[in-house]
Amino acid sequence: MSTAADQPAAQPYTGRVTISDVARVAGVSVATVSKVVNNRYGVASATAERVLGVVADLGYESSLVARSLRRQSTNVVGVLVAEFEPYSTELLKGISSAVAGTGYELLAYSGGSDGGTVTGWERRSLSRLAGTLIDAAIVVTPTMVLSEANGIPVVAVDPHTGPEGTHTVDSDNTTGAREAVEHLVALGHRRIAHLGGRTDLESARLRELGYRQALDGAGIGVDPALVRVGGYRPETADTPARELLRPTRGERPTAVFAANDQSAIHVLEVAAELGLRVPEDLSVVGFDNIPESATTSPPLTTVAQPLHRMGAEALRMLLDVLEGTPREQHLRLPTSLVVRASTGPAPA
Amino acid sequence: MSTAADQPAAQPYTGRVTISDVARVAGVSVATVSKVVNNRYGVASATAERVLGVVADLGYESSLVARSLRRQSTNVVGVLVAEFEPYSTELLKGISSAVAGTGYELLAYSGGSDGGTVTGWERRSLSRLAGTLIDAAIVVTPTMVLSEANGIPVVAVDPHTGPEGTHTVDSDNTTGAREAVEHLVALGHRRIAHLGGRTDLESARLRELGYRQALDGAGIGVDPALVRVGGYRPETADTPARELLRPTRGERPTAVFAANDQSAIHVLEVAAELGLRVPEDLSVVGFDNIPESATTSPPLTTVAQPLHRMGAEALRMLLDVLEGTPREQHLRLPTSLVVRASTGPAPA
DNA sequence: ATGAAAGCGCTAACAC
DNA sequence: GTGTTAGCGCTTTCAT
């Protein structure tokens, strides 16, 4: 074995070592090198050994791009996200642990330019990668329906359009939200606000539905003044959060159920800024249970989505589809309420 | 504008829409389509419009792979990790937020097969992607020295070989570790164990160095029986953790300083299993401050690395190198002790 | 203003 | 057993 860790000074031009470099040095054709590298039959063992030696010497590694272009399959699974934020990275951890031992490699691509507002990133990313770079894809919170017409299997996680069209993995948004609000009701809260997500997103609608169900069930009417659109992101949640906590007229709510943890965390910040104590003056509940929700002060009560498991299940589903194993189109996992310190009895 | 969201039934064969499909439908050559798509000069506006119409109709998006192969630059920055675990994903969040608005896209690749034990994954991944798919790369905790001989700029984050060779971003491991152990000393602990990382890794060595410095400074000798190799991973930390907590002879330590959070969290689990109360019977300190460290019970006291910032700085450094702006080769960021509930006064 | 042709690095038929 | 050739989808001279 030669010193694979050294950089050879073999080529005049800088840059990567290609298959033709190996071929030239080994004195064979590129086809032969290709065969050796891919363990194809029909190569004399002496030749193979010599080529392997050169490969090691030069530190050659085949270009994923060139290989992908020529081959039909790449053994790479894509994870398409708008950006790498807490939600998508939690999923990624689950996907990553599930991919170990399957022979597939993971390629996470963030093509959603500047945040989550730009729609259509998933179609664009899929088109750019499908069929050439990746064999199949997991798309995180797509905002549009993805047909599999790009030619590769797709599993959508928490699709914002509801489980139609593609294979999907999501969690029970309605029940989760209902339980969260029931928890607040049980603590004696009556003026419970809802900082919603985006009205065009299915998950946000379902969470609001759960909110309304819980209120109805408790015989509490929904006060429209206590329901605001928050948009899921700290920036977009700022104004509505302030409107909720510093009402121009009427009473302040004693609790806020936010549509996701990022908004809930921002509510915590606004509350602190306004001098409101949590949970003495105000209770706050989030949704998702991203790890960050445990690091706030006080730690956030939230509805846990089993994010790691959702990622792992999505990968398994994708691999099954890829290999032709029949699967249910949709998988819905249960949520669970995680009670931490941001919720307490309603102020007297 | 046509209905870009629809899938056209234009082609007989399934699969992605290629540039030749567009060319055929629009009645022009592929060269012209390429020019239009890339805004090159020398295309009649009428032709351009027609082509754009077909592009929209067919939902064409150029293949990243094919384009990369032909072009020299791709406008994609790679993040190479062994796997997507808490540490690398925190970095990824910082990188992702820093990349917004730069015009670059992010491609995170996990080529480290089954965990962190396999060495050389970084060289392999780099070779497979460099020069074709990505213009530059951030490599997370590489275990070997990476020359830039792959032809693209590289920034290593927390390299396990120390800041040599490439551009690097890391944090002050020694000081962080020293402060952690000084915290334990201040709480009255004298029998302080160290569950180390891998002996071949610079960061692990520096953390052990800090541990020794703190003990020396307090006039406490290092008891070799209290120092174990933990390997940074829960599985590898299991046996040494048990040896430490259930000593065959001698006294049990009253505190453990683990080389990273993942090991520290495992110590917490082993302690719970053995019926040890934390922090009454045993104090535990970790290193890294991954979000998960706040979710344990009790929440873990740890040395925070500014992971988001490290990621963001790494990206900025990389972009500077890419654009030829002169930069210091190394950036070392300070750590800070985060005291939570896993540390308390030494038992009497 | 447009198209023909070469070639990026690689693999797969098919010849020799 | 080995080399030659074609071509994956795209960009880029260079003719026309």
Image (tube, coloured by chain):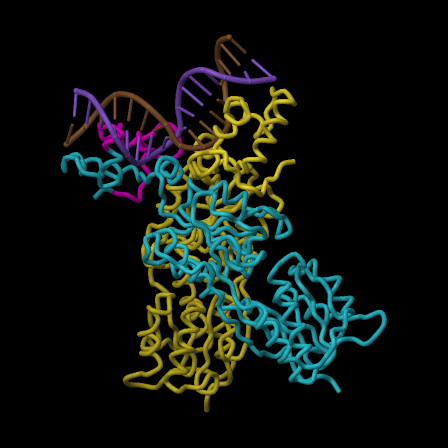
Chain colours: A cyan, B yellow, C purple, D brown
Q: In this view, does C5 lie to the left or right of A215?
A: left
- Compared with A19, B112 (above or below) is below
- Say which quadrant the N terminus of chain A sits in: top left
Q: In this view, does A344 lie to the left or right of A310?
A: right
Residue B151 position in % (x across, y down): 42, 36
Residue A82 visible? The answer is: yes
Q: Residue A110: horizontal and vertical position, in percent?
A: 53, 49
Total labels drawn = 0
Region of the chain picked out in magenta, as a range: A3-32
Residue B20 x/y as whole percent: 48, 28
Residue displayed at 60% across by 43% down: B102
Front residue of this view, candidates B200 and A126:
A126
Does the magenta portion include A15? yes
Q: Magenta stretch: residue B327 in it?
A: no
Compared with A91, B52 (above or below) is above
- Quadrant in which the C terminus of chain A is drawn: bottom right
In the foreground, A231 or A214: A214
Residue B222: x and y in percent read: 37, 75
Is residue D13 left or right of A227 when viewed as pictured?
Answer: left
Front residue of A87 and B194: A87
In the displayed image of the protein, which residue is found farthest to the right?
A249
Q: Main secondary structure of the magenta part?
A: loop
Q: In which quarter of the image is residue A131?
A: top left
